[in-house]
Image (tube, rainbow, N blue to C red):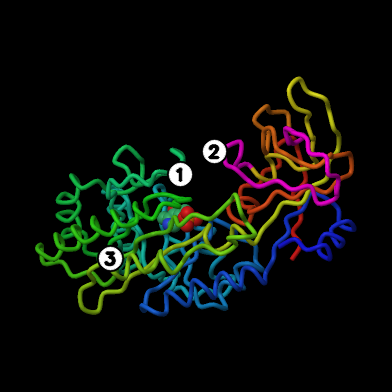
């Protein structure tokens, strides 16, 4: 919640900047951890959502593991105190250097996505005389009903091993002596707010574990990924996602074998709502249908609207005018897609007003670029 006292502080800070509410982050983490502990599940934080050190350290104090998708994320996890046995390394294109680094760190497991990658991990592990632990990322062919750029669990997506390849993969694994198959991994997409795709995922997971059991393969863990969405429309009334319903689905539906662990990798649901991008209006310009409010923040600080037509709530923190107008809220970058919202209802807005773009804690700062040679915006906690 951006209270008047906080907004008063903002007036003294150079814009644009990312504002993080660590109290809300802690409340969110407690809520998630409570449900996870209820069922004895294991929760990893998906680093790619936000890698700010303060955030990583706060999350670490709640005992979460790390879900990494690059060698540098693995390194970042270790530097921020995450134990290597709680680090998973996923990603559709891991380079040899990244694999070598992760092997040296003895991480919990590689979530592997292709036949060729398995051969490469085996070869590099053999050179080091190590056994690499592997979870196969399977493509469950479940539609997450989310934006096409953030749906990942359909056969047409580049992610995961498709069911028709599974026998080939298992035959290969028998030959690769420096790999140990320890688990299965799934991740169907992101910003999923309808819980039904998760129910479908559970059904698919059960089919796959039964199949593996029939083949005599024992799995130590099942990882069902992340993807739980947040309420971008109402970041104050629903600041914390419904973790209770989410985890309950898996508790009720997934049939775990004796001793088998269930792992989750949440990113957005944990960090999105604790962040806001704070900016100032540089100019108001009259358009044909609506006016433009031109901000000092742009797609370089938050690319989600340009990249996936994502909605973020926009608020004018300075104006207390009763007269509302429609504005196209845009950034200063030389791209027409550099627009945070079209025809946004805002109180009469003028040069110098502070604008908050809400729910930017996930996939905001981590996707920043210095396009147009812009400076990196700073963070305030
Ligand atoms: C991005 C990603 C996540 C986290 O997704 P959220 O939607 O932020 O929860 C989890 N697992 C994998 C493999 C990912 O790529």
From the image, state whether disc 3 or disc 1 is nearer to you: 1
Q: Which residue is mark 1?
A: 150
Q: Residue at x 64, y 30 (%)?
A: 337
Q: Is residue 97 visible?
A: no
Q: Is 286 placed left or right of 344 in the picture?
A: right
Q: Nearer the viewer, residue 118 or 190?
A: 190
174 shown above or below 348: below
How far is mark 3 from mark 1, CA to CA?
24 Å
Quick check: marks 2 and 3 in contact, CB under 8 Å? Answer: no
Percent coordinates x, y for residue 155 in the rendering: 29, 41
| Structural crowding at the residue carrying mark 2, measured as other residues with C-alpha within 10 Å and reported as few (<14), some (14–19) or many (≥20) | few
Percent coordinates x, y for residue 213 in the rendering: 13, 66
349 shown above or below 238: above
Mark found first going from the N terminus, 3 or 1? 1
Residue 81 forms part of the magenta stretch: no
Q: Is 136 placed left or right of 265 in the picture?
A: left
How far is mark 2 from mark 1, CA to CA?
8 Å
The C terminus - image quarter: bottom right
Residue 319 forms part of the magenta stretch: yes
Mark found first going from the N terminus, 2 or 1? 1
Q: Which mark is residue 236?
A: none
Q: Which residue is mark 2?
A: 308
Q: Residue at x 22, y 69 (%)?
A: 255
Q: Nearer the viewer, residue 322 or 138?
A: 322
Q: Which residue is mark 3?
A: 183
Q: Nearer the viewer, residue 209 or 102?
A: 209
Q: Nearer the viewer, residue 168 or 146?
A: 146
Quick check: marks 2 and 1 in contact, CB under 8 Å? Answer: yes
Q: Which secondary structure lies at badge 2? A: helix
Mark found first going from the N terminus, 2 or 3? 3
The N terminus - image quarter: bottom right
């Amino acid at each position: 919640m951006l209270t008047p006292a906080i907004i008063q502080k903002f007036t003294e800070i150079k814009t644009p900047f990312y504002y993080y509410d660590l109290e809300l982050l802690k409340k969110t983490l407690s809520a998630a951890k409570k449900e996870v502990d209820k069922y004895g599940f294991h929760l990893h934080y998906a680093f790619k959502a936000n890698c700010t050190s303060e955030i990583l350290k706060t999350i670490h104090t709640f005992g979460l593991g790390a879900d990494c998708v690059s060698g540098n994320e693995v390194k970042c996890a270790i530097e921020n105190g995450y134990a290597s046995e709680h680090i998973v390394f996923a990603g559709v294109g891991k380079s040899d250097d990244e694999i070598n680094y992760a092997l040296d760190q003895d991480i919990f497991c590689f979530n592997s996505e292709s036949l060729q990658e398995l051969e490469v991990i085996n070869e590099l592990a053999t050179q080091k005389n190590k056994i690499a632990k592997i979870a196969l990322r399977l493509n469950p062919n479940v539609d997450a009903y989310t934006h096409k750029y953030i749906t990942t669990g359909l056969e047409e997506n580049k992610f995961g091993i498709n069911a028709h390849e599974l026998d080939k993969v298992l035959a290969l694994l028998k030959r690769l002596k420096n790999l140990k198959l320890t688990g299965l991994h799934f991740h169907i997409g992101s910003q999923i707010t309808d819980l039904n795709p998760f129910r479908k995922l559970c059904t698919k997971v059960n089919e796959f574990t039964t199949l593996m059991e029939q083949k005599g393969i024992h799995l130590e863990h099942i990882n069902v990924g992340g993807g739980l969405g947040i309420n971008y429309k109402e970041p104050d009334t629903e600041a914390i996602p419904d973790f209770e319903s989410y985890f309950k689905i898996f508790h009720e539906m997934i049939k775990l074998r004796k001793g088998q662990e269930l792992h989750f990798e949440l990113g957005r649901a944990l960090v999105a709502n604790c962040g806001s991008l704070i900016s100032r209006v540089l100019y108001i310009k009259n358009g044909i249908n609506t006016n433009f409010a031109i901000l000092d923040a742009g797609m370089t600080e938050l690319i989600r609207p340009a990249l996936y037509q994502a909605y973020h709530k926009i608020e004018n923190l300075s104006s207390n005018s009763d007269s509302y107008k429609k504005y196209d809220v845009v950034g200063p970058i030389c791209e027409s897609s550099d627009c945070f919202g079209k025809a946004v209802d805002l109180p009469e807005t003028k040069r110098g007003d502070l604008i908050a773009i809400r729910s930017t804690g996930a996939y905001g700062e981590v996707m920043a670029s210095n396009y147009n040679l812009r400076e990196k915006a700073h963070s305030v906690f």
